[in-house]
C-alpha cells in the first residue's frame, strides 16, 4: 500500500518538489514507482553551481532530456564557474524556449544566447546578467520580437545603445525594465527611452569615468522610477506625466555636477513620493506641489532638510538619515537627543490648516544609529495629532 504522501494529487506533489533544489527533487524518483517521474511535475527549474559546479552540466542535460514534452514555467540558471561551456547554456535555453518557458533568469560567466530566444512567443519575464564578459550576449539578430515580454532585467558592458536597446525595442508589451550600464569609455549616444507601455524603470549607470550624452525619458505611463550608480549624464524628462514615485540613489556624486542634480530634480518635481541620497546641500530646489512623502539619506549637511520643507507645501512625512562627517562630532557631547527643525519661513508656501508633517531623523556614526525627532506643524484650528 502506498504511503499517504504518494496519494497526494499531482498539483500538491509539484508544489512540494518545487520547494527543494532540482537535484534533490530528481532523487525522489527512487522512493517508489509512484515517484519515479513525479519530479517532472515541477514546472520551475532552478540550477545553481555554487556547491557542485563539476556535475551541473550533467544534471541539467539529464533533466532537460527528460522534460522533452513537459511545459516549463521558470528556467533559472546561476553559474559562477567558467568551466561550463557556452554552448551548453545556449542549448538549455533553446530547449526551454521549445517547452514554452515563461520566465528566464540567466546569471552565468560565459553565454551566447540562441536565436530562438529572441522570438519566443511565451516569454513574459527575462533577466540576463553575466559578470564582466558579455561580448556574445548582446549581439542581437536582425529580428528581435518578444510579444509577451513584460519584465526585462539586463546588465551590459559593451555597446549598450546598439545591442541592449535593440532588445528593448523588440518588446512591445514591456511594463518593467531594469537596465544596468557599465561603460568604460565615453559614450556619445543619447539613451532614449520611448516605451508607451512602461510602468516601472530602473536605470543604473555604474562607471564614473564614462559620460553618456543624455538620458531622455518619453514614458507617459511610467509610475515608478529608480536612478542609481553614478550621476554622469543629463536626465531629460520629456514625458513622465504619470510618475508617482521616484528614487535617486547615487553611490558616486561629483561636486562639479550639481547642475545635473538641478535638472534631474526639476524633472521629478511632479512626484508624490521621492527618495534621494547624497544630495548636495546648496542646490536651488524646484517646488514639489504634489509631494506627500520624502526620504533624505546619506547627506552630509543638516541644511538639506529645511529647503525641502520650504519646497514641499503638501508634505506629510519626511524621513531623514544623516551620515555626519567625523569632525562634526568632535565637539559634540551627545550624538542622540532631540533636533529642533523650524517650519518654512515663507508663508506663501506653507500648507493649509490640516497639514501635519512628521519627521523621523536618524544620525549615524560608524555603526551606531540613533532615532532623534518628530516634527509637527499645526494651527490652532486644526487639532491634528501626530503618531
Image (cartoon, rainbow, N blue to C red):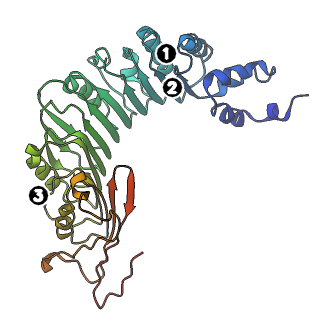
Does residue 285 lie above or below 218 as drawn?
below
- Residue 376: which numbered mark, if any? none
Q: Which residue corresponds to mark 3? A: 282
Q: Secondary structure at mark 1?
A: helix
Q: Is residue 243 visible?
A: no
Rendered location of residue 143, percent (x, y) = 29, 20
Mark 2: few/some/many CA within 10 Å (<14, 14-19, 20+): many
In this image, 195 relative to 173: left or right? left
**How far apart are labels 3 and 1 at the CA level?**
54 Å
Farthest residue in the right direction? 1
Q: Which residue corresponds to mark 1? A: 92
Residue appearing at x 35%, y 72% in the figure:
374
Q: Which residue corresponds to mark 2? A: 75
In this image, 180 relative to 25: left or right? left
Q: Secondary structure at mark 2?
A: strand
Residue appearing at x 23%, y 46% in the figure:
219
Q: Between disc 3 and disc 1, whose residue precedes?
A: 1
Does residue 159 lie above or below 356 as drawn?
above
Mark 2 touches mark 1? (CB < 8 Å): yes
Residue 364's image quarter? bottom left
Q: Secondary structure at mark 3?
A: loop
Rendered location of residue 22, percent (x, y) = 61, 24
Residue 24's image quarter? top right
Residue 165's image quarter? top left
Image quadrant in which the N terminus is located: top right
Amino acid at each position: 500500500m502506498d504511503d499517504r504522501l504518494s496519494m497526494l494529487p499531482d498539483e500538491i506533489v509539484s508544489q512540494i518538489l518545487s520547494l527543494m533544489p532540482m537535484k534533490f527533487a530528481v532523487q525522489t524518483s527512487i522512493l517508489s514507482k509512484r515517484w519515479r517521474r513525479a519530479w517532472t511535475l515541477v514546472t520551475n527549474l532552478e540550477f545553481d553551481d555554487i556547491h557542485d559546479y563539476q556535475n551541473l552540466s550533467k544534471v541539467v542535460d539529464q533533466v532537460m532530456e527528460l522534460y522533452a514534452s513537459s511545459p516549463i514555467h521558470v528556467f533559472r540558471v546561476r553559474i559562477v564557474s567558467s568551466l561550463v561551456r557556452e554552448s551548453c547554456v545556449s542549448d538549455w535555453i533553446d530547449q526551454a524556449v521549445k517547452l514554452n518557458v515563461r520566465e528566464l533568469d540567466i546569471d552565468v560567466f560565459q553565454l551566447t544566447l540562441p536565436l530562438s530566444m529572441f522570438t519566443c512567443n511565451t516569454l513574459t519575464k527575462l533577466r540576463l546578467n553575466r559578470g564582466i564578459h558579455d561580448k556574445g550576449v548582446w549581439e542581437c539578430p536582425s529580428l528581435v520580437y518578444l510579444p509577451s515580454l513584460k519584465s526585462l532585467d539586463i546588465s551590459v558592458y559593451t555597446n549598450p545603445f546598439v545591442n541592449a536597446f535593440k532588445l528593448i525595442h523588440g518588446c512591445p508589451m514591456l511594463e518593467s525594465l531594469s537596465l544596468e550600464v557599465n561603460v568604460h569609455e565615453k559614450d556619445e549616444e543619447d539613451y532614449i527611452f520611448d516605451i508607451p507601455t512602461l510602468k516601472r524603470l530602473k536605470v543604473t549607470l555604474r562607471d564614473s569615468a564614462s559620460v553618456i550624452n543624455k538620458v531622455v525619458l518619453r514614458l507617459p505611463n511610467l509610475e515608478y522610477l529608480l536612478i542609481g550608480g553614478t550621476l554622469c549624464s543629463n536626465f531629460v524628462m520629456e514625458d513622465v506625466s504619470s510618475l508617482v514615485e521616484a528614487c535617486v540613489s547615487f553611490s558616486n556624486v561629483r561636486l562639479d555636477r550639481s547642475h545635473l542634480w538641478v535638472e534631474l530634480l526639476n524633472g521629478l518635481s511632479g512626484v508624490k513620493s521621492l527618495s534621494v541620497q547624497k544630495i548636495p546641500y546648496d542646490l536651488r530646489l524646484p517646488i514639489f506641489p504634489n509631494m506627500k512623502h520624502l526620504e533624505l539619506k546619506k547627506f552630509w549637511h543638516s541644511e538639506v532638510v529645511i529647503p525641502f520643507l520650504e519646497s514641499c507645501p503638501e508634505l506629510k512625512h519626511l524621513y531623514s538619515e544623516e551620515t555626519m562627517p567625523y569632525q562634526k562630532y568632535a565637539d559634540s557631547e551627545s550624538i542622540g537627543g532631540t533636533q529642533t527643525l523650524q517650519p518654512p519661513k515663507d508663508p506663501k508656501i506653507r500648507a493649509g490648516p490640516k497639514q501635519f508633517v512628521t519627521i523621523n531623523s536618524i544620525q549615524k556614526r560608524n555603526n551606531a544609529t540613533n532615532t532623534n525627532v518628530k516634527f509637527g506643524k499645526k494651527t490652532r484650528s486644526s487639532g491634528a495629532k501626530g503618531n
